[in-house]
Amino acid sequence: MVSGSLVLIGGMTLLVATTQGYGYYVPRIPNADNVDGYNCIGHTSDNGHKPPNAFGKAFENAGNEWTVALCQADADGDGQTNGQELGDPCCVWTESSGDAPRWTTGVSHPSDATLKSDPCLWANINCNADTSASSAATEANSTVTPTTTTTTAPTTTTNTTTGTGTSDASSIMNLRCWASELALATSIALFLA
C-alpha cells in the first residue's frame, strides 16, 4: 500500500509540473488558447504528455518564444504561415504588448495540415514588406503597425484578462488540461494500488 501511495504522490507532482508548464507557454503564442478542439497545440496529444508536434518542435527551436521566423514558417506545410493560422499574419504580435492578436476567432492549428484559417481574414491586410521593421516589433520599445487596404477586416474580439495577464479562455484550457491529467494520475494510482 505504501508503494501505491508513493506512486500517487509522484504522479501528482508530475501532474502539477506539467500543468504549470502548459500555463507558462500558452500566453507566449498568439491564440494558443483559441484553437477549437485543442488544448495543447504544441503536442501530438491534447494533454501535453506526448512528444511535441512539428509546431511544438519549431517553438522549442525558437527558444519557446513567438518570433518573426516562427511566425513566418509553415510548420504543417499547408501553405499558410503559422502567423496566418494563429491570427498574426504580419508577425507583429508580442506577448509583452498585452494586446490580442489581429483576430481571435477562425484560427487554425499550425501543426495540422487538414485545418486552415480562412484566407479572407488577411486578404485585405497589407503587411509592411520590410522584415527588419517586423523584427523590431519583438523589441520591447518598438512597434510596427501594419496598414489595411480596406475597412472590411474582421472584427477582433479581445479576451478579458485577469490581473496576471492570463485570459479567461486560457484559464479554462488550463483547467481542462489539469482535469485530464488528474484523471490519468488517479487511474494509474488505482491500478497500482
Image (cartoon, rainbow, N blue to C red):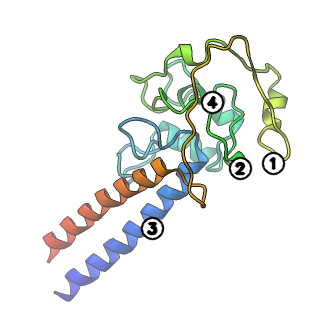
Q: Point out the image quarter for the C terminus.
A: bottom left
Mark 4 vs 1: CB contact within 8 A: no
| Count of number-bearing discs | 4
Reply above or below: 27 against 120.
below
The amino acid pointed to by label 1 is Ala
Q: CA distance from mark 1 to mark 2?
A: 7 Å
**Percent of width and height locating residue 143:** 81, 37
Which residue is painted at 23% across and 83% down in the image?
5
The amino acid pointed to by label 2 is Ser
Quarter of the rendering containing residue 59? top right
Which callout, 2 or 3, points at the residue further toward the start of the chain?
3
* Label annotation for residue 140: 1
**Percent of width and height locating residue 33:** 47, 44
Which residue is painted at 42% across and 45% down in the image?
43
Which residue is painted at 35% across and 51% down in the image?
47
Q: CA distance from mark 3 to mark 1?
A: 29 Å
Quarter of the rendering containing residue 89? top right
* Label annotation for residue 102: 4
Q: CA distance from mark 4 to mark 1?
A: 19 Å
Which callout, 3 or 1, points at the residue further toward the start of the chain?
3
**Percent of width and height locating residue 164:** 60, 61
Which callout, 1 or 2, points at the residue further toward the start of the chain?
2
Q: CA distance from mark 4 to mark 3?
A: 32 Å
The residue to which callout 2 is attached is: 96
